[in-house]
Image: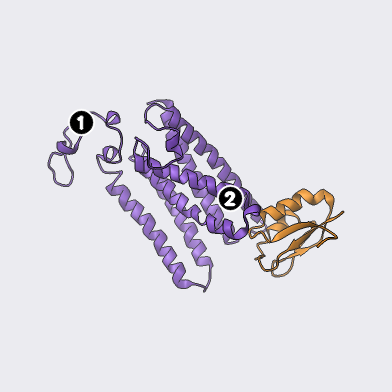
Amino acid sequence: MSALWYATRATGEVALLFLTIVLALGVTSAIRVGGRRVPRFVIAGLHRNLTLAGLGFLAVHIVTTLADSYAPVGVVDAVVPFGSAYRPIWLGLGALAFDLLVVLTVTSLFRTRIGFRWWKALHWAAYACWVIALVHALGTGSDIRTSAFLFFAGICCALVLAAVGWRLAEGGQDNQAFRLGAGLTALIVVIGIGVWTVRGPLEPGWAKRSGTPASLLPKPVAVTSPATGAPAEGDGG
Amino acid sequence: MAWRLRVNPITCTGHGLCAELLPEAIGLDEWGYPILGPVPDRLLPLARRAVVDCPTLALKLERDGKS
């Protein structure tokens, strides 16, 4: 494995960190935090500029993935989801999150042309963008088994849940049923991702199940299936 | 020809970001809604930024004289 492959993994994780911070900042400005000590235009400026910085890391993430010869990923796979030879679903989610992020950024930069209502309606997709990026990181990330990465992913989830909870709690008495539902949905999504992580990427054999080309898999050895205790040579290789 | 700011009182929700960016021309009333003053030419770039950065796009910058 080359330095490019390590650069891909590192910049991907940094981009996820930026997305998390940017989402939290967006929530912060939506609920009008700010005042003398932390002016609102500073929060709004950070929200915009950290998004652009995160896009820079994302550009390096994508270019190093394409340039590296380890995984067979083409230029088209970076933009068009679910078509790649390498882990099509989980890499595809990354392409989808990238597309969404570009749309969100461009529409925000041209917000005055698009009009507030359209921009706002579209900007709700930022939550989906973060979730998709997180699942991409967990599903295709090579560092899933390192405790540092899992800790980092947990921190990101906690930050976003805290931001969402804060936003929902700020609303006062209006739409309480909706707020409760939205909060529960957010909780269920994050718990669902956690359960899926334990039963999917953290289980042995994920590299094969996620669609890694056979040529990149380690040479088949007699793997013991954890559930039955029976040798699972039949579906290996 | 001078420029002036106008606020759409329906879309404005009183974030107060504009007054932070351009305190020379924008004050806030006691509920946090903007009170707009004249915009000198040297402050036009900041006025444009206040218009673009308004969280609800409620500010407009227009030429004085025509409505």
Chain name for mark 2: A
Instruction: Assign the N terminus of chain A to one quadrant of the image.
Output: top left
Q: Residue A154: x, y in percent?
A: 40, 49
Other-residue count near label 1 (Cα within 10 Å), few / some / many at <14 / 14–19 / ≥20: few
Q: Which chain is orange?
A: B
| Picture quadrant of residue A87 | top left
Residue B32, horizontal then vertical, whole percent: 69, 66
Residue matched to label 2: A107
Please tell me which of labels 1 and 2 falls first in the chain. Answer: 2
Marks 1 & 2 on one chain:
yes
Any mark on residue A211, and which? none
Whether residue A149 is visible here, answered yes or no, is no
Disc 1 element:
loop
Q: Is residue A112 above or below residue A2?
A: below
Res. B32 in view = yes
Amino acid type of the residue tagged 1 in the rendering = Pro
Q: Is residue A154 above or below residue A34?
A: above
- Residue A225 drawn at (x, y percent): 17, 42
Colour in which the image shows chain A: purple
Say if A115 sits above or below A231 in the image.
below
Question: Disc 1 marks which residue?
Answer: A220
What amino acid is found at the position of numbered circle 2 in the picture? Answer: Thr
Residue at image point 67% right, 54% down: B53
